[in-house]
């Protein structure tokens, strides 16, 4: 019989619900209450590829220390879904808690000896209080939030403020919800005092941080980065990025006088059309993007090759989900790295950015448009479902008002008029980036014909071997230039000198940071490098060469980033140890810590012998 | 800023248009198509139309897919930008280009394989959206560039050396009608008298203007019974079974009065029955246009002329309510909300 | 070889069909769609139709794309193979399956996003080829599974919280007609009386049978002015701006006589005007069908019933003149020419 | 002044023509004449992406020793195209010959001192002989063939037999062509005796070999391999494969009694539909294939992912051409290796076969259908334009009549009836290959639902992490099984022990063999391994480990096969030296020899020091 878990500002609450039951808003309300208590949370939605009636879970990690990755394990389960009861109960850590609706009594066999049940007759209370079946269901959720507040010691005022904020402007709803909250709170206060060893103590760890999803933030990055054309096709988990862009534009991009839009958003008939529109707009000088996920990336391949070879700016957000094929559409993964890096047939190489969280998604989104126009090629912002569709606690977004867009090398009518020679594929500056002209620029100079076929430096069609090779080699050199322009990797050295290094990227970061702290506590030291872009900067190669063994932590089956490293940096694979997590759930610090610790202690032993 | 064209001084003899441009100013590089190809006739009709409309050549953007037809934008308007994109996807590329800069004239050139086979979806959806453009389908019923396979517009029952086409043909004009095109016409490559005015009207139209242009492929005659082509050559090519020797072909012309029907014999001997709309025909009734089309089709006639036009059509920019300034001219000044607004935004997420 | 089904003995009370199967034998796994979804009504109509036709359940192949609608093949005919392929590409997969084995009954289930948006091209071309199949489009005007964006069949002017649809809608029935479908019908998910017989006729038809079935999505009402849904819930969902709480919805039924018009109010309060073909209507004249359709459409009516049928239609296997034995049953004995023929072949290349 | 080149049965003749001028058949006639003299030839077409009026070349390498790769250089140029005259003349080796139409005299500046002009008034003769302009053009070609015959010492009877064969059954044409041939022959005999130091001496090096193109042979392989469904979309250079399949089927697959077809060929509306049809047919138990090239491979990505994940047999012929994008549609390359091996988003791996010539294309084509059904996954036959569209001299095709098709693991109605458990994704045999059932098999057993989403071993939909991982790991194990089934690599060791190895594949083989002979003559020894499939068999890894330095010869820019090797075999890239040729022309022995010799002698020197 393990003793009941006791913890302050450091535990995991998991809600098991049915989608469409109104639980989503209540669960989010709960997370907000913790944040309003000044305690950091990391919340994650686990939802099905369906609209109504299937199981859905919401995980809230309360972490006073501010760890934002998934922790794994469950201290308190709010089990509201009979369909998944057994599984949910089984997933609770020994000594943990089980909050459940006790209206209909369940046989003891349905419970666990080593788990502390917290029964509340929710349905009962609801039925007594409300006549309308819909209200009965809706308020049941707010009610368990109330009970939790009481159990965890969250001040009622905090919850009431949170409710007021959630239903801002809808007094009727506020009142009703506060009432329901009270019902739950009071019941727990009366019947369940001391039933739960977990509690929340007010703190100020949250600071001025914001709680935002990556798709929302990236969409805002597109607004700040000057995107004017968006073409997209709905697909989970990227849909909310395109929809958020629309919302932000309606807010920030409508001309106050004329009421006209400084943006154009088209829901295309499919992904091929979406990327085609983006390329057409980019060719014609507008900043354009599309947002999609794996299947869309597969469909866009031919156009990616065209944009690479004809050198047309484009920005593509790949909100990665579980592949291959339709795979696990509502789960997260980092498994489109290779298909993006080498997109399309023939010899190609593309630019990838790997934001670590919503805040960096905002920054890289804006940055991507500068890179696309500077390098005249597609830029892939490689996000994932975890970053895109979950709310993350991040530093406030910032913008330097003195920043001007880098529109890249566009030859103007004046320059043409002044007689500057224009060769669309001519490397005048030695950086392998040629000048382009926009359609309609000049009556008699600078017009050229864009094509996906081989042509000479002056855009004239050619089937000559040397002409083709000349162009292909310049494209390689352009990638060299890109290495100096993309976001640099970030290195963090261990307190002590070590021969072990670790590479990681994207949404793995939060779990990695936590894992590093844990490893350090156990006296296991690693230097780390967070890769933020492909092609890889020199620093990446240096880092690897500076360490005998380098762990590469990825969320895919085939160690895709490692393949890229070995390919592009000519590094002996023997140096690498891959840590792979790809079951569709976000990687946890526990997983990384165990995997690395095991190998490092082993290595140590060997050394010792 | 845009530049105003200053045509160079020219021998007064050469005819110039309102802007002082000569016909030459609208030409492009030399065609690499087969002698006599209908597509070349269309190119020269386009050049003629632009010259007569006195368009500034560089204010046109030419877009196409892949195919012999899709090569033609290179053979006209040498002063305007062109984009030979990928097979069947011109409509999406044109749509994006159009969104980026509403001030240019967009000319989409495609073929029947490019538009009716691989590109059918994009064709349909760009028409539905009412993109302000002139969309031309240079329709020869075959895949020219890949050597004569049937396209989706080939008549049911048409024969090739090895096969008989059994799929029902796609009538691009009928399709454009039910998809909501606001300007729908058909013509024949060799009929400049009809084609040039239609092209001018299409350019003038604000919205999706679609013109299906029957444009004979003088090379891949899908009619093995062909008697027209020189027997000896035919025998030779049969024997070595490839298109080894290509006879020089003459352009196929047509000149007939509105309201009349004319039959045209192609180089392969196959017959084409063109019927030109009567001047009395009223192109404002879509249902009637559809009925008329089907009725004549039943009679084995290919109707030509302006079948339908919606005078006060609205284009996608109107629907999207975009600003008058082309989007590609807006800078951070107009586009970036700035740090103050961002601070307020942050607040909403606390 | 194929097996003949031996239905298990059952309580004499349960009704069985000619083959001795009960209704149960045609059911599939439990639906995961929203309560009241029109798609579920269609599934049960399909089950009913197959039961009445006394089809051997396992002789059906069910194919679909991706979407709520495309999930439904899993909810019927549990004894037949199903293939939930990729978005918008069911027609090509069905075509290949059909070529491999001409002996099965092919049921293609799709949605309006799956067929009219991403899949328009494949829809059009499989219809043109005359694949012997029943092609169902469960048409709700929205993308259900991705939460309510407009599909290409959404009416012009229909509103969502954030947008007004400005693209002209695609009428799948009109499209099927001009593309050469040999069986074209439309119905309403909640009208079993009409739907079941239509489905049976479609299965019986040898060729491309297309049925457009208006099938309300009870979830994503694209009408913000909606008054129908419970105000409190609406306010709640607005406030948290997501579809947080979903009201249980009832199936929307329709029961009206041939030759009459009925108006149906959807859960979002939007009105649907269905007009059922008169028994006197002759479905053998395509041009007339087209005209009739457009005429009623102009009146704001959605015509339902069998619009067009070609009695002696031919299917792709007929066109390709394939052997009667399913191709997937042929072995090296029938397929491999052998070494002797190969020797002769070699000679031709010396 | 270099002395005129003299050579017997070892020289290169290049024809410069305009397409559509009737030269193709005449040039082929010339090649046939050499073959009929018992002397091996390697011929290659260099044609534009256009139908009529543009430059086209035909290269005939006469090689008594039987080298079939491109040699490079030109000994005798038949310059019939004024547009390309200068370039053509410039390309002749010093001491070489220039056969030209002397009707209109050209200024001396148009000729080269070090090249021997062979003037023939072709137009003149034609105009004198023929009135019809079409005949004048047509027969001009046969006439220069006649002249060549005389200049090179080919017996008239050989040419006349070749003409008779070419126009078999068309007496009128035979007579006319023989007459034209005679005119050319006699003129040269009379005026140009001894003008050319090149000659053809009858020999018996050809044996019973056949002269055939790879697309033609592969198409026949599909007929012999039991393909019944073909779905395709025209694209150079794959079109002739699909068209040849039709021709072969009409010949071999029409039921003699019923006159009905034991095949179904559909020209799809695009590549996506084509692969969709192939997958539908494969799912339903027919052997199906498609043929395409780069752009098609890009468009088919999404479906490849479905076939990999849902495990559906499919055969795909990729006749590679110059990429990226539309690239060089009428040139050759090996640049789709990566996109095929890792096709589609998410973690995937696919099976690739690399035939070296038309004969192996026939064999691998037939083999591919067995592999596809055995492994239940797409099989890519990676050909290229050089193999596919050029006629190659190869051993006669053979077939073992006792061979039966391997239909793979298909559970029958009998087995189901007998109560054998069926789990669509259940690994019963430990080879990671599950059983499948075909639609319509059994009234109440074995039906299942195929999907691109994650599901359990019994094909039931599941979003459970462990269930997904279990399946993904089995798919990896299936690739291990594949290693034992695909065509083994072929090793050839040098006469002397060496630390140098070389890897190559596909159309590079002929040039490689010649290069090896040349290197050996210079005392440079290499062991070689010809890779014939991906995933790589153990032998490949062993070979690499057995050599300090391994050259990898490829026809692409980015060393794509090398990347695959490094990735999949965990080999240090430092071991490899890539020899890359990617200008769109077939790689030559000269190129390989120089590249390898340079590096080996360098290495030797270093060793010596
Ligand atoms: C994705 C892709 N598939 C196939 C091709 C090969 N291809 C080039 S042009 C063409 C058909 C052109 O037919 P059409 O559009 O009618 O033009 P035409 O040559 O008849 O004028 C095809 C199939 C290609 N370029 N890209
Ligand atoms: C290639 C691809 N793009 C996008 C999606 C996401 N997606 C799934 S279903 C769907 C639309 C479904 O709409 P519809 O066919 O009308 O079916 P409904 O849900 O309305 O019944 C979309 C866009 C996908 N699965 N695959
Ligand atoms: S092949 Fe046909 S379409 Fe192409 S250029 Fe020649 S005539 Fe024109
Ligand atoms: S979302 Fe709409 S279409 Fe999908 S299941 Fe629910 S009601 Fe049906
Ligand atoms: Mg065509
Ligand atoms: Mg829908």
Image: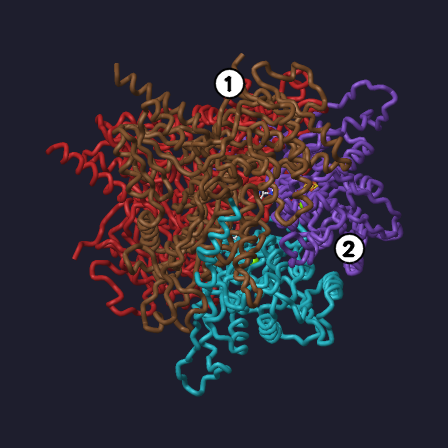
Chain colours: A brown, B cyan, C purple, D red
Q: Which quadrant of the frame does ligand 6 lie within? A: top right
Q: A489 or D253: which is nearer to us?
A: A489
**On the rendered structure, is D38 left or right of D112?**
right
Are marks 2 and 1 in one subunit?
no
Where in the figure is residue A91, as x and y percent of width and height? Answer: 56, 22
Residue where numbered disc 1 is placed: D430
Q: Secondary structure at mark 1?
A: loop
Seen in the picture, residue D109 relative to A189 is either above or below; the reply is below
**On the rendered structure, is D604 left or right of A402?**
left
> Quarter of the image containing the C terminus of chain C?
top left
Instruction: Mark 2: give few (<14), some (14-19) or many (20+) Cα within 10 Å.
Output: many
Where in the figure is residue A85, as x and y percent of width and height? Answer: 63, 23
Q: C135 or C69: which is nearer to us?
A: C69
Instruction: Mark 1: give few (<14), some (14-19) or many (20+) Cα within 10 Å.
Output: few
Q: Tell me the chain of label 2.
A: C
> Quarter of the image containing the N terminus of chain C?
top right
Name the quadrant containing residue A602.
Answer: top left
Look at 44% across and 28% down and name the residue there: D486
Seen in the picture, residue A119 relative to D165 is either above or below; the reply is above
Residue where numbered disc 2 is placed: C286
């Amino acid at each position: 019989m393990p003793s009941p878990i006791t913890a302050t500002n450091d535990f995991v609450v998991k809600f098991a619900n049915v989608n469409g039951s109104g639980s989503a808003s209540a669960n989010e309300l709960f997370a907000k209450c913790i944040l309003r208590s000044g305690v950091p949370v990391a919340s994650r939605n686990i939802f099905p590829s369906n609209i109504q009636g299937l199981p859905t879970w919401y995980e809230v990690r309360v972490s006073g220390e501010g760890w934002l990755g998934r922790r794994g394990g469950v201290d308190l389960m709010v089990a509201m879904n009979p369909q998944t009861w057994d599984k949910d109960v089984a997933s609770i850590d020994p000594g943990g808690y089980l909050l459940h609706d006790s209206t209909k009594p369940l046989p003891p066999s349905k419970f666990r000896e080593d788990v502390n049940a917290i029964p509340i007759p929710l349905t009962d209370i609801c039925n007594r209080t409300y006549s309308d079946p819909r209200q009965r269901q809706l308020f049941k959720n707010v009610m368990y939030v109330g009970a939790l507040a009481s159990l965890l010691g969250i001040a009622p005022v905090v919850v009431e403020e949170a409710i007021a904020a959630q239903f801002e402007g809808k007094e009727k709803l506020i009142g009703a919800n506060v009432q329901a909250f009270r019902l739950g709170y009071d019941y727990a206060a009366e019947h369940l005092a001391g039933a739960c060893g977990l509690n929340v103590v007010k703190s100020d760890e949250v600071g001025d941080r914001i709680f935002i999803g990556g798709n929302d933030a990236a969409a805002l990055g597109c607004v700040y980065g000057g995107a004017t054309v968006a073409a997209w096709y709905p697909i989970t988990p990227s849909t909310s990025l395109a929809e958020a862009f629309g919302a932000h534009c309606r807010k920030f991009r409508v001309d106050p006088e004329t009421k006209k839009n400084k943006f154009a958003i088209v829901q295309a008939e499919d992904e091929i059309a979406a990327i085609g529109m983006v390329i057409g707009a980019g060719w014609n000088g507008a900043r354009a993007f599309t947002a999609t996920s794996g299947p869309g990336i597969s469909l866009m391949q031919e156009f990616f090759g065209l944009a690479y070879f004809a050198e047309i700016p484009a920005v593509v957000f790949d909100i990665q989900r579980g592949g291959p094929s339709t795979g696990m559409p509502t789960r997260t993964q980092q498994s489109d790295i290779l298909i993006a890096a080498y997109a399309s047939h023939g010899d190609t190489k593309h630019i990838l950015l790997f934001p670590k969280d919503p805040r960096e998604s905002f920054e890289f989104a804006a940055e991507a448009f500068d890179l696309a126009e500077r390098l005249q090629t597609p830029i892939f912002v490689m996000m994932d479902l975890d970053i895109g569709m979950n709310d993350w606690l991040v530093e406030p977004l910032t913008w330097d008002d003195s920043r001007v867009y880098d529109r890249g090398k566009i030859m103007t009518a004046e320059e043409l008029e002044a007689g500057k020679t224009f060769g669309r594929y001519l490397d005048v500056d030695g950086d392998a980036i040629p000048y382009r002209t926009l359609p309609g620029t000049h009556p008699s100079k600078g017009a050229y014909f864009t094509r996906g076929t081989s042509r000479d430096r002056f855009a004239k069609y050619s089937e000559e071997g040397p002409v083709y090779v000349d162009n292909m080699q310049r494209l390689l050199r352009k990638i060299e230039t890109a290495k100096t322009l993309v976001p640099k990797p970030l290195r963090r050295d261990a307190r002590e000198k070590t021969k072990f290094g670790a590479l990681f990227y994207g949404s793995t970061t939060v779990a990695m940071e936590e894992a590093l702290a844990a490893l350090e506590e156990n006296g296991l030291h690693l230097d780390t490098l967070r890769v933020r872009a492909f092609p890889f900067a020199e620093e990446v190669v240096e880092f690897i060469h500076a360490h005998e063994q380098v762990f590469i932590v990825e969320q895919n089956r085939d160690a895709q980033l490692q393949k890229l490293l070995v390919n592009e940096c000519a590094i002996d694979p023997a140096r690498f140890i891959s840590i792979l997590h790809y079951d569709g759930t976000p990687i946890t610090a526990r997983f990384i810590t165990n995997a690395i610790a095991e190998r490092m202690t082993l290595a140590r032993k060997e050394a010792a012998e | 800023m845009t530049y105003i064209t200053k045509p160079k001084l020219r021998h007064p003899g050469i005819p110039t248009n309102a802007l002082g441009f000569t016909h030459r100013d609208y030409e492009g590089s030399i065609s690499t198509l087969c002698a006599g190809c209908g597509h070349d006739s269309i190119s020269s009709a386009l050049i003629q139309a632009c010259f007569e409309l006195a368009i500034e050549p560089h204010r046109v953007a030419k877009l196409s897919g892949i195919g012999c037809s899709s090569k033609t934008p290179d053979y006209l308007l040498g002063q305007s930008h062109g984009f030979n994109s990928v097979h069947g996807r011109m409509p999406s590329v044109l749509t994006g280009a159009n969104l980026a800069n509403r001030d240019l004239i967009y000319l989409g050139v495609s073929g029947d394989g490019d538009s009716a086979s691989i590109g059918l979806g994009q064709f349909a959806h760009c028409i539905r959206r009412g993109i302000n453009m002139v969309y031309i389908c240079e329709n020869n019923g075959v895949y020219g560039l890949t050597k004569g396979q049937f396209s989706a517009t080939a008549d049911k029952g048409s024969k090739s050396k090895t096969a008989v086409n059994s799929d029902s043909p796609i009538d691009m004009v009928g399709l454009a009608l039910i998809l909501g095109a606001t300007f729908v016409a058909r013509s024949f490559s060799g009929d400049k008298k009809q084609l040039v005015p239609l092209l001018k009207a299409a350019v003038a139209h604000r919205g999706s203007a679609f013109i299906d242009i029957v444009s004979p492929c003088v090379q891949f005659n899908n009619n093995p019974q062909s008697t027209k082509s020189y027997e000896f050559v035919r025998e030779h090519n049969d024997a070595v079974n490839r298109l080894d020797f290509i006879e020089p072909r003459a352009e196929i012309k047509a000149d007939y009065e509105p309201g009349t029907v004319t039959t045209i014999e192609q180089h392969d001997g196959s017959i084409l029955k063109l019927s030109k709309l009567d001047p009395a025909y009223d192109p404002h009734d879509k249902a009637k246009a559809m009925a008329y089309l089907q009725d004549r089709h039943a009679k084995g006639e290919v109707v030509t002329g302006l079948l339908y036009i919606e005078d006060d059509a609205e284009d996608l920019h109107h629907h999207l309510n975009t600003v008058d300034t082309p989007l590609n001219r807006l800078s951070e000044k107009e586009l970036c909300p700035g740090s103050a607004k961002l601070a307020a935004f942050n607040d909403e997420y606390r």
